[in-house]
Image (cartoon, rainbow, N blue to C red):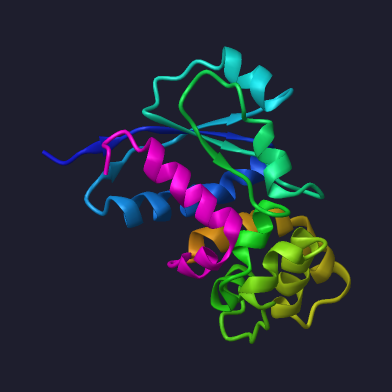
Amino acid sequence: MNRQLTYSVVADGGTDRALVPIIEWAIHRLDPQVEILEPEFRKRSGSVGEFLASYKTGAMIVFVHRDAEAAPLTTRLKEFQGVNRKFVPIVPVRMTESWLLVSGLAIARAADHPTAEVTLPPVHQLESLADPKKELEDLLIGAARPLAGRRLKKFRASIVTRRVNVATLIGDFAPLEQLPAFRHFQTELRDNYPYGI
């Protein structure tokens, strides 16, 4: 019988569902044969420590998201210290959207214009982008052009859904392994993986 894995995602907000394809890609990279069951998704309120102290789940592994925003990775990771449970911190620098800027094709497809050419920032620069969310949104709008008036307004109204869709359309997150924050996530996943692989 195949191994099954239940997991939970504790995130800053609802749009961080974009983390699910990234998490599942990383799990399958570590354990290709595991069957991943539907995740539990919880929005965190309060500090990481306070939330995890009272958080109850039957999931085998808990992923806790916290954007680095303007703080260094090491500073954000200190927020996880002293928590009395096993979990995997996910701390993109600066925000989740920086990890979605690795596939021009996925962005073009999420913009409903799969033949559009999308010029991405170099992967090694993703952690130094001032506003990855705006960068992703600008690339989506650019891929969908020409848009103006009502069509542009309608497209902007769907931008949150399109950002999440980008993640589901990326088949390979391996380029992110160039980034220290992503490598830290992979290390924590390996160290806390319930099947001990």
Q: Quarter-wise, where is residue 55 in the image?
A: top right
Residue 88 higher or lower than 101, as above or below? above
Please name the residue shown 63% across and 68% down the image: 101
Most extreme residue toward the right, as rendered? 149
In the visual, does 23 lie left or right of 197? right
* Foreground pick, 80 / 151: 80
- Left or right: residue 95 compared with residue 62: right
Quadrant in which residue 113 is drawn = bottom right
Rendered view: 22 above or below 114: above
Residue pushed farthest top?
Answer: 54
- 196 magenta-colored: yes
Question: What residue span does the magenta drawing correspond to?
Answer: 171-197
Q: Position of residue 144 (x, y in %)?
A: 71, 77
Magenta highlight on residue 144? no
Residue 191 place in picture, x, y as percent: 39, 40
**Most extreme residue toward the left, as rendered?**
1
Quadrant containing the N terminus is top left
* Residue 132 drawn above or below residue 20: below
